[in-house]
Amino acid sequence: MEWTRAKRYQAYSNWTAAELLSLQQQVATSDYLPHYHVSPLSGLLNDPNGFSFFNNQWHLFYQAFPFGAVHGLKSWFHLVSDDLVHWKQQGLALKPDTIYDSHGAYSGSAHVIKDKLFIMYTGNVRDKDWQRHPYQNGAWLDKNNRLTKLQRPLFDQPEHTTDHFRDPQLLYLNNTYYALLGAQDKETLSGKIALFCSKNLHDWQDLGYLDFTNNDMGYMVECPNLVLVDNKPLLIFCPQGLNKKIMNYDNIYPNVFIIGDTLNLAGASFTSRQAAPLNFDEGFDVYATQAFNAPDGNAYAVSWVGLPDISYPTDQENWAHCLSQVKELRIKDGCLYQRPVPAMAQLRTAGKHLTPGNNKISEKNCLIDHPSQHFELKLTIPAGQAGTLHLAADKLLTHSLALEFSTSKKAFLSVDRQNAGAPFAKKYGTKRSVKLPADTSLVLDIFFDNSICEIFVNNGSHVLTLRLFPSKKQQKIILESSQFIDYNGTWWNLKPIN
Amino acid sequence: MEWTRAKRYQAYSNWTAAELLSLQQQVATSDYLPHYHVSPLSGLLNDPNGFSFFNNQWHLFYQAFPFGAVHGLKSWFHLVSDDLVHWKQQGLALKPDTIYDSHGAYSGSAHVIKDKLFIMYTGNVRDKDWQRHPYQNGAWLDKNNRLTKLQRPLFDQPEHTTDHFRDPQLLYLNNTYYALLGAQDKETLSGKIALFCSKNLHDWQDLGYLDFTNNDMGYMVECPNLVLVDNKPLLIFCPQGLNKKIMNYDNIYPNVFIIGDTLNLAGASFTSRQAAPLNFDEGFDVYATQAFNAPDGNAYAVSWVGLPDISYPTDQENWAHCLSQVKELRIKDGCLYQRPVPAMAQLRTAGKHLTPGNNKISEKNCLIDHPSQHFELKLTIPAGQAGTLHLAADKLLTHSLALEFSTSKKAFLSVDRQNAGAPFAKKYGTKRSVKLPADTSLVLDIFFDNSICEIFVNNGSHVLTLRLFPSKKQQKIILESSQFIDYNGTWWNLKPIN
């Protein structure tokens, strides 16, 4: 089937239930389906939306197109959880069914107001000439998870932006509602973060652009997200077309962060000593991260694991992408840390302790040979070691995800997915590397889940997330080294979340 | 919407995806949805089908009509499990898409043959005059869970039955395949179990009716199921229109069993000293139980928790029914025992120990007050006690599921759902009772899951299963007695299976 524009944007009522049931069956039987990450029932998943805590539950939504692995007519799919790990599917909560979101209920956020959850999102509308009209809309979710849309948009596109004006994040600070939006400036066609404020959610004032950098942020900024982490304002966003002289990145579009020093939203000001944005995730596939300050005092983030404008192997199976696990954010000594939430440990089944023992002299030490490719591997490598940890490896190491490391003077960790399975996105390189502190032990906490791998380095000072599409034969974990190598760790098979 | 015949049997392609997505969303947000029992994604679930162990996994299917709480055009929905408790949904595996199953892929069974799973099922076909033609069809499921139907039916309806001829159970004994089928004799219009055999699955021989009783079994027998339990043949089936002089039952149709002494399928003979069939489950809502002999040496059974021709409160929410938990079968001293599988205990979270303590003198002792209505309660009541255990009780006991018991001379347990919540099926009585051994302690293992309750009595010598539809206010467990009462037990909140 050719994905014409008409096909992508046709009403859900123009698809048959038979088609949807077949798609759902095809996805449910996919070998690449994650076991403990959120993935779509069918079709495409992208941005996390409306991440919040309401009515004694965690709520999370994602952008969903149920009919194929393309960006078509989007809805919000709703999930609830008691522990940020086990997510219960609640179906499509927000659908494109009004004149203010006729071509997609696009990304947005949620904020608890009294006994309801207020949802703010971009209604994507195209006119007859396919000209885009982005409306910023509101909806209320009640305690029975019933959703009611506001009759009219909250506000329209301002004069000073193009029609690239979307992804509102609603914040409440100093008795004022603020909305941060991704925007493209009309005059300069450059990426901006637009800022609006309101006392009552009805009357909105345009505060212009947030002043957060002196650098050019490319042609568009998507998914701006502001969160307080250990009393520092943290700005997360996705600049498109960013000049690589400003910051180095390899993915088609980076998902970046800036740790701020001062924040004054009324004055549209965010100051930072950080010279340039940094990659939020140093792997291959993280985008559109959404974080929020939860009532438990923590800041939690969740990411789309997938990138715009890239084909993935499961496109052939009519589904694409998943969400990252939820990550707790911390700032320590001016550095951002991301770590798994405590409930992730509840997925562990009886662990297998790993030490070199008598195998220390072996050059290719098979640590694990297990058909389960949904596991956690926690491994500490002392200073002065070098080698390659192969995940999803076959016998002859023809195929594997190769994690090369040194914990000596020029310490580093690199991840190469060139031979990890079905090829994709090779244009953007198959290797990502991070520098590590010299002569220091390396602590890896690796979450592997069939076709997604999240590597937490040194207690979350780096995270490298990636998709990979190995064959069923790739079921070993092999530690390769030309020298005697020391290590200490545990491997756990992880239980599925549904 | 009126459920006309045309509407119930229209092709899945005549329903829109928008309708199905709305139905799925409505069901996902239902307050009555079980947490650890299999229930439909939308629409109606009935008979369990194809229960088997294949490719290192448990397989289970159920009869599914995805578009509403009515018996419409049926498919087989596929589930797989590693532990008989956590079931992973695999979508619609067997759909009504040939001329031999055009009006429904009806019930059947599965049997592992070499490296594939052979599925035998009834293809329901109606001609222009709405005359029924039941075909007995075959299909192969491979190790990738891909299903291929045979081109032609295995065999047709025999001369000696009416068109009520369905629900094949495939068995392999003494190098021969046997198929047991529910049937109505053409001459007498009485319920029978038809028997066919084959050496090769292609050429089938009609062995007439299984000789298993001298009693009249009503006008139709559904879902015949033969399984070996502790070296005894156990015949489970559903007689419709059975005379209550033969055996006592209260449900619209009973699901019964006979423990046999000898079995000779080649001779179409099953002998038993049991005078009459007994209720497989002594509660309100069990039907169409399917059991099989697993390679681990155990016999496992699973039931439809729902009855034909009865309206349930969730019909208004466009879904109906669930499956029972899997029950391990045993025969000891000529009696049938059913008990939970070991993995059920893995759903337990930290338990709360229950003893009378200082509350022993209280008349209405609130054991538990917890909003979670998905729990297990194991309670031992010593001999010489009497009282009522109220589940899903409100403060004033205006509403509750009332379990009255005596462990004295005339010992009994009765279950009354009259005031348990939204009313249904009152025509068939609101109370079920079992006699218990006199002056002996009573051991209850109760599994409660929002709208289903399974009560295992004295290590499974009786099981009482029922649906109930309590309000959110009914969250207490109260033990009521006019005397000092002694007891000892544990309450566990149970984790959801998805």
Image (tube, coloured by chain):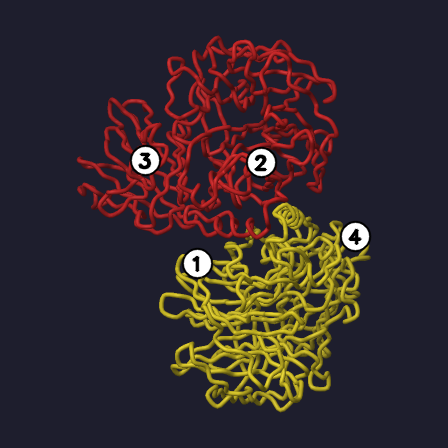
Chain colours: A yellow, B red
Q: Residues within 10 Å of mark 4 (few under 14, many from 20)?
A: some
**At which x and y percent is residue B468?**
37, 39
Q: Nearer the viewer, residue A319 or B12?
A: B12
Q: Secondary structure at mark 3?
A: loop
Q: Chain of mark 4?
A: A
Cα–Cα span, label 3 and label 2: 34 Å
At x 50%, y 38%, the residue is: B3
Q: Secondary structure at mark 1?
A: loop
**At which x and y percent is residue B326?**
51, 35
Q: Chain of mark 3?
A: B
> Which residue position is annotated with label 1?
A145
Cα–Cα span, label 1 and label 4: 50 Å
Cα–Cα span, label 3 and label 1: 29 Å
The amino acid pointed to by label 2 is: Tyr
**At which x and y percent is residue A81?**
48, 58
Q: Which mark is residue B9?
A: 2
Would you say A150 lies left or right of B105 here? left
Does residue B193 lie above or below A45 as drawn?
above
> Which residue position is annotated with label 3?
B417
Does residue A314 lie above or below B492 as drawn?
below
Does residue B328 lie above or below B352 as drawn?
above
Cα–Cα span, label 4 and label 3: 60 Å
> Which residue position is annotated with label 4?
A395
Among numbered discs 3 and 2, the one appearing first in the sequence: 2
Among numbered discs 1 and 4, the one appearing first in the sequence: 1
Q: Same chain for the residues at labels 4 and 3, yes or no?
A: no
